[in-house]
Image: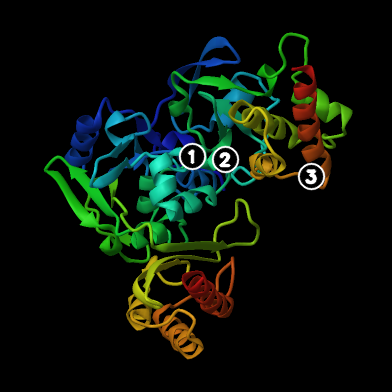
Amino acid sequence: MRAYLPAYEMETPRDLTAALLRMAREPGVWRAFAGGTDLMVLLEAGKLPHRKFLNIWNLGELRGIAVTAEHLTMGALTTYAEVQRHEILAREFPLLCRAAAETGSVATQNRGTLGGNIANASPAADSPPALIVYGAEIEIASTGGARWVPYASFHTGYKIMNLQAGELIRAIRLARWRGASWKQYFRKVGARRAQAISKICFAGAGRVAAGRIAEVRIALGSVAPTVLRAERVEELLRGQRPDDAAMLLAAQDALGAEIAPIDDMRSTGRYRRNVARNLLAEFLEVLAS
Amino acid sequence: MPAEAARKIRVSCVVNGTAVTCEAYPMARLLDVLREELKLTGTKEGCGEGECGACAIEMDGALVNSCLVPALQAEGAKIRTIEGVACGGALHAVQQAFITHGGAQCGICTPGMILAAVNLLARYPQPNDAQIRDGLSGNLCRCTGYMKIFESVVAAVRDAETRA
């Protein structure tokens, strides 16, 4: 059933300070509303539980991509379209650009934001695996100030995140990637190439030195209650040859133990397990090439 | 019936070059404001959840699905709908190509398809085939099988090149 529109309030705060004050005065009552690509879908389905929203879409403090020698910092309202257009992101963080290009359609990419993608907390989101591989940090703002937290520990359970009432995601920061020698791999598997929400999403990066995996990072979406970093698999792979067939089987088994995919409207746990194994094999082929 | 919390707000924006002001609930869909308040019924509703692109419009130059834009966020925006694509009596090259090459069948997806194609050409004046496919990938059609739509856009690009 469609939502009853008069029940929903939305206001446009003058600036970030005004937004944070509003959220602090009535904790948990006012929620941030960015590009609407998730919330408007819930509204239309009559399933939007919150009633009061702050329209943060035009807040300049949450926009823009700043680059220093050390970091690349994206305002929370950075859209997928902006991610794809950014030259340094394309050069140094291609997994994030690939994820942005494969999220929804052009129209979705113009409105969907990185901060919104994180706050929506879907384990099937496409940008988080890339953010985890790159060791992203996120800045949380409130009237009490700002704090930086590692993104990998931000989501603690299905739709549960380290964000208190009155707090807002302000920015996402990536340490500049100095590893031109890292090989990077991204693959999203969905019902079709465009538009689909993923059945499984895999992001990996690794560096091979003297024929052995020196460093490796792997993250997957849609295989657990949160987007998952496959730390045990990474541990197993370090020091190994990427083309070692016995090692591949062991790593695939380790991955199978680390993930907990479910049956849902988009796929089955069994299919996701099989594809996760295959994507790991494909990633190792990339490392070996 | 839940308590009425929100009142209608006045939203002022520029639609197809004309300044307009209308009243709407803050979270009313821009799609409904366009169709029901402004009587611009060229913009269609397909899925109502951002999957099909039938309600695509341009907002400040960017292609967006109007079913996912709350009325409040249209404040101050420059909006172009299918009614604003032709220039006076002259059809846009993409519109003409859809007619010539059979790109429209039942017509529900057509306004969104044309907006997506026009927006693509604004970003890439001479798109290659892959860019055209990508530019149309957010728009679903249940009649044509897509090839005639794709061929219409290819023809619009080719005709523009011939004239240039």
Local crowd at mark 1 within 10 Å, few (<14), some, or many (≥20)? Answer: many
Q: Position of residue A181 (x, y in %)?
A: 38, 61
A269 shown above or below A47: below
Chain of the residue that carries numbered disc 2 in the rendered image: A
Same chain for mark 3 and mark 2? The answer is no
Residue A27 in view in this figure: no
Residues at badges 2 and 1 in contact (C-beta under 8 Å)?
A: yes
Tell me the amino acid under the disc marked 1: Ala
Tell me the amino acid under the disc marked 2: Val
Chain of the residue that carries numbered disc 1 in the rendered image: A
Residue on which disc 3 sits = B146
Residue on which disc 1 sits = A81
Residue shown at 65% from the left, 27% from the top: B125
- What whole-number distance in Å separates the C-alpha atoms at marks 3 and 2? 17 Å
Q: Position of residue A64 (x, y in %)?
A: 33, 34
Viewer-proximal residue among B14 and A30: B14
Q: In which quarter of the view is residue B163 placed? A: top right
Residue on which disc 2 sits = A106
Tell me the amino acid under the disc marked 3: Tyr
- What whole-number distance in Å separates the C-alpha atoms at marks 2 and 1? 8 Å
Local crowd at mark 3 within 10 Å, few (<14), some, or many (≥20)? Answer: some
Residue shown at 45% from the left, 57% from the top: A125
Task: Determine the residue located farthest toward the bottom in the rendered image.
Answer: A246
**Disc 2 on helix, strand or loop?**
helix
**Disc 3 on helix, strand or loop?**
loop
Viewer-proximal residue among A267 and B154: B154
Left or right of B100: which side holds B45?
left
Q: Position of residue A14 (x, y in %)?
A: 27, 25
Q: In which quarter of the view is residue A238 placed? A: bottom left
Local crowd at mark 2 within 10 Å, few (<14), some, or many (≥20)? Answer: many
Q: Position of residue A153 (x, y in %)?
A: 26, 64
